[in-house]
């Protein structure tokens, strides 16, 4: 799976120094800063590289830990360089960063369509990985992410940080200790996808390498409403709220239901497509997931009934009681009965994360699996992916979770595979 660097690598120094406004594209530092030659790094053990440092990815740039940053947008690099006060190497091509032997671990905060390949290549390069959610864009690449993490003994955490919140911890142990009885239904709600406008295509700005931003995605003309935050509203790059927030809400749901190893047997989605604008994710969407052994269903309603005045979340329906868990990302909440509950001495307890990023750093040191290990993150991404495929095809999918194939549906199975573009293939 290793890519040749011969045909596509471009150094940032040659092409983007002007766009950075004079910032030097590559900084060289003594071993004491990077943890080389037996010298401890400022983090004491971990030297970090950050891939994708705009938006969410900028939160991972850590003075004292970060040794290198990478982004295809020179403005993002310039902002990261200023935050690091010139104390990090700057790259445009992530493979140059992965070549560095002094870097122990990387964060990946790129658009969704890059998560898979970058994680696989980072594992091959011997780096531990914190990759933003959702884990993958295609089921084929998601399975290869898991395989790469196991093959190269890497710690890979997916950034569905709801599992590291206090509310989710209390809700999970409340549910797993049987306080709701047998839970047969989980109903998730979220507000609609936005509808775009007809902003025309144009020439990419000089600070952005549009071809490298597209990477494995199919080529299309540049449009300012396709990049950065707005990639979420195109099926080619993101996939709407079901992938963006669904990867949070359903991560907490699978954890509470102790279903990280359980896949659905069927997925059925309906939705109303947008009637204007360049974004193609459906504003409204309803998805039903059926699970067997144990039997339960999960629904995604967009929009759905808003509970506890929260914009998104899930309600768990047991034969004894119900429980609401709001949010799913870093802003989880739940009902007081769960927050005040203490399991009996012989009851079920669950892992209490010190924080999502902190849990990952701890596991990099201990080599334990993190709270949102890549296998669990991949399982959540499968739900998001299948929901969008069912919507696009307009029919129910019967899913074989063991073979990871749609049963008797060759057309649907073609949507599972990363086609790639140019050198960007599995």
Image (cartoon, rainbow, N blue to C red):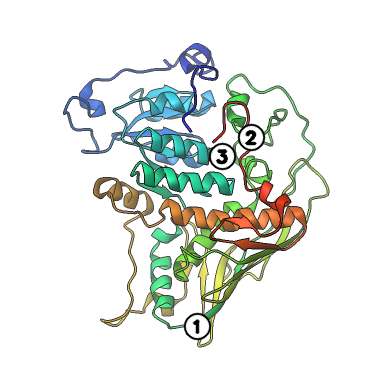
Using residue 360 as the reference point, say whether residue 77 is left or right of it: right
In primary-sequence order, the first of circles 1 and 3 is 3
Q: Are marks 3 and 2 in contact (CB under 8 Å)?
A: no
The secondary element bearing badge 3 is classed as loop
Question: Which residue matches tag 1?
Answer: 182
Residue 344, image quadrant: bottom left
Q: In the picture shown, does residue 237 fall above or below 421?
A: below
Residue at 60% in and 52% down: 243
Question: Which residue matches tag 2?
Answer: 217
The secondary element bearing badge 2 is classed as loop
Name the spot of residue 10 as percent of width and height, x first. 51, 17
Q: Is residue 145 visible?
A: yes
Q: Nearer the viewer, mark 1 or mark 3?
A: 1
Using residue 122 as the reference point, say whether residue 406 is left or right of it: right
Q: Are marks 1 and 3 in contact (CB under 8 Å)?
A: no
Residue at 45% in and 70% down: 256
Residue 209, image quadrant: top right
Question: Which residue matches tag 3?
Answer: 111
Q: Is residue 301 visible?
A: no
Q: CA distance from mark 1 to mark 3?
A: 38 Å
In primary-sequence order, the first of circles 2 and 1 is 1
Q: Which class describes the residues within 10 Å of circle 3: few (<14), some (14-19), or many (20+)?
A: many
């Amino acid at each position: 799976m290793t890519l040749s660097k011969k045909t596509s690598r471009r150094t940032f120094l040659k092409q983007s120094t002007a766009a950075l406004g004079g910032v030097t594209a590559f900084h060289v530092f003594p071993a004491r800063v990077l943890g080389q030659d037996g010298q401890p790094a400022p983090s004491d053990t971990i030297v970090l590289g950050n891939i994708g440092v705009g938006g969410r990815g900028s939160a991972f740039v850590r003075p004292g830990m970060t040794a290198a940053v990478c982004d295809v947008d020179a403005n993002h690099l310039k902002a990261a360089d200023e935050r690091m006060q010139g104390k990090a190497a700057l790259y445009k091509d992530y493979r140059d960063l992965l070549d560095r032997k002094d870097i122990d671990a990387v964060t990946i905060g790129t658009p969704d369509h890059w998560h898979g390949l970058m994680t696989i290549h980072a594992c091959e390069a011997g780096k531990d990985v914190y990759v933003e959610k959702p884990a993958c864009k295609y089921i084929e690449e998601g399975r290869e992410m898991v395989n790469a993490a196991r093959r190269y003994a890497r710690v890979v955490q997916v950034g569905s940080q709801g599992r590291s919140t206090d509310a989710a911890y209390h809700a999970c142990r409340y549910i797993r200790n049987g306080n709701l009885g047998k839970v047969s239904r989980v109903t998730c709600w979220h507000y609609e996808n936005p509808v775009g406008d007809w902003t025309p295509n144009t020439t990419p700005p000089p600070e952005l390498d549009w071809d490298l931003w597209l990477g494995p995605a199919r080529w299309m003309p540049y449009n300012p409403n396709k990049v950065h935050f707005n990639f979420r509203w195109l099926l080619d790059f993101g996939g709407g709220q079901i992938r963006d927030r669904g990867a949070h809400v359903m991560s907490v749901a699978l954890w509470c239901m102790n279903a990280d190893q359980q896949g659905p047997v069927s997925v059925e989605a309906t939705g109303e497509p947008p009637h204007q604008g360049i974004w193609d994710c459906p504003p409204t969407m309803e998805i039903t997931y059926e699970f067997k052994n144990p039997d339960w269903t999960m629904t995604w309603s967009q929009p759905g009934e808003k509970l506890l005045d929260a914009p998104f979340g899930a309600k768990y329906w047991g034969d004894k009681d119900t429980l609401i868990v709001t949010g799913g990302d870093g802003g989880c909440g739940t009902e007081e009965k769960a927050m005040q509950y203490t399991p009996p001495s012989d009851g079920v307890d669950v892992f209490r994360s010190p924080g999502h990023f902190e849990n990952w750093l701890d596991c990099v040191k201990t080599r334990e699996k993190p709270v949102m290990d890549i296998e669990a993150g991949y399982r959540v991404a499968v739900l998001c992916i299948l929901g969008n495929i069912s919507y696009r095809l307009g029919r129910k999918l019967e899913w074989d979770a063991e073979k990871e194939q749609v049963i008797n549906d060759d057309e649907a199975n073609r949507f599972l595979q990363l086609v790639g573009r140019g050198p960007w293939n599995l």
